[in-house]
């Protein structure tokens, strides 16, 4: 479903601030793969996600989704392929519009985006049922402006909007990092439910090792712009935080104990 081949990206090339963010990354995601991606700050995980999303062009390599080469497409032309949830809960929704209006816009993705035809009662009932799964009280607040919601409620809504029309690839950019632990856990649980329900090919960047291990069927670790670990199957099911740290050290020859900036195991 997603194929990344020999991807390179360097920021500020030829200057003292030159940074190689992606160094020949190759990655294949099968239909329905739920991949968690972890690594230190600057490891390249967010750069890889943004390259797939089309936030910036890559220097070399190709990106294909479901057999279509999207490497040269701007981000807005990738919308028919990609659903995305950002780290910032304030992104991905229209703050001055009601919950039901935001959902209606997401439902009409790829169509003429107008609310002139109105939101049907059938749609409202469908929205209520979907929102109930979050257990955040949103199903009774369809005419509440999104800007009045808490960060967790808004992030849950963004997740639902990103998946109302099944995307080819769902990109989750540390989408629970700004939430309190209880709400983050709930959003992750519902994320897993939605991914499994619709068999979504999902690429989830996280800083939390426990979340990376607990969710998805495959775990990728990046370091210095390269994929250094790719773990799946029974190996991932039986993985512990200690195992993961040891595997990283073997793969890179780098000690990560006491490096709080590298990985969060809380």
Image: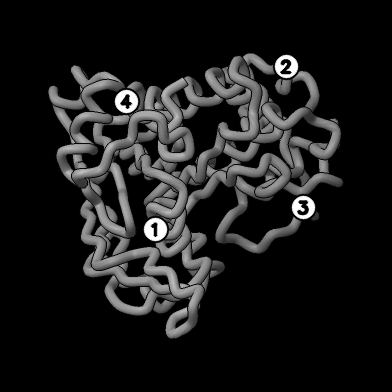
Instruction: Give the vertical position of 251 relative to 123 (above or below).
Output: below
- At 68% from the left edge and 48% from the top edge, which residue is drawn? 91
Image location (x, y in percent) of residue 137: 72, 16
Query: Which numbered mark, 2 or 4, is in the foreground of this view?
Result: 4
- At 66% from the left edge and 48% from the top edge, which residue is drawn? 92
Q: Is residue 30 left or right of residue 264?
A: left
The local secondary structure at tag 4 comes to helix
Q: Nearer the viewer, residue 14 or 110?
A: 14
Query: Which numbered mark, 1 or 3, is in the foreground of this view?
Result: 1
Image location (x, y in percent) of residue 12: 49, 78
Asked whether residue 197 appears in the rendered view, the answer is no
Query: Which numbered mark, 2 or 1, is in the foreground of this view?
Result: 1
Instruction: Give the vertical position of 217 relative to 27 (above or below).
Output: above
How far apart marks 2 and 1 lie (CA) works out to 35 Å
Asked whether residue 141 appears in the rendered view, the answer is yes
How far apart marks 2 and 4 lie (CA) works out to 29 Å
Whether the residues at callouts 2 and 1 have beta carbons within 8 Å, the answer is no
Would you name the residue on which mark 4 appears? 213
* Precedes in sequence: disc 3 or disc 4: 3
Q: Nearer the viewer, residue 225 or 98?
A: 225
Q: Residues within 10 Å of mark 3 (few under 14, many from 20)?
A: few
The label number, if any, that marks residue 48 in the structure image:
1
Image location (x, y in percent) of residue 251: 17, 43
Q: Residues within 10 Å of mark 2 (few under 14, many from 20)?
A: few
Would you name the residue on which mark 2 appears? 137
């Amino acid at each position: 479903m997603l194929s990344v081949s020999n991807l390179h990206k360097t920021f500020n090339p030829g200057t003292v601030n030159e940074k190689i963010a992606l160094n020949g990354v190759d990655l294949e995601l099968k239909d329905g793969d739920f991949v968690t991606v972890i690594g230190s700050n600057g490891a390249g995980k967010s750069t890889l996600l943004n390259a797939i999303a089309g936030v910036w062009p890559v220097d070399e390599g190709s990106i294909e989704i479901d057999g279509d080469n999207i490497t040269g497409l701007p981000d807005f032309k990738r919308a028919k392929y990609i659903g995305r949830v950002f780290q910032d809960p304030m992104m991905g929704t229209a703050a001055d519009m009601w919950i039901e209006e935001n959902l209606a816009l997401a439902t009409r993705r790829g169509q003429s985006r107008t609310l002139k035809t109105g939101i049907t009662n059938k749609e409202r009932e469908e929205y209520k049922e979907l929102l109930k799964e979050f257990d955040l009280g949103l199903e009774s607040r369809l005419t509440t402006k999104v800007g009045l919601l808490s960060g967790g409620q808004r992030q849950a809504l963004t997740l639902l909007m990103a998946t109302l029309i099944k995307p080819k690839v769902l990109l989750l950019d540390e989408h629970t990092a700004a939430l309190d632990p209880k709400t983050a856990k709930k959003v992750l649980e519902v994320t897993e439910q939605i991914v499994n329900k619709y068999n979504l090919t999902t690429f989830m960047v996280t800083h939390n090792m426990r979340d990376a291990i607990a969710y998805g069927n495959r775990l990728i670790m990046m370091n210095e712009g390269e994929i250094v670990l790719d773990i799946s199957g029974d190996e991932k099911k039986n993985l512990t935080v200690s195992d993961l740290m040891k595997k990283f050290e073997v793969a890179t020859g780098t000690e990560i104990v006491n490096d709080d900036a590298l990985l969060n195991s809380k």
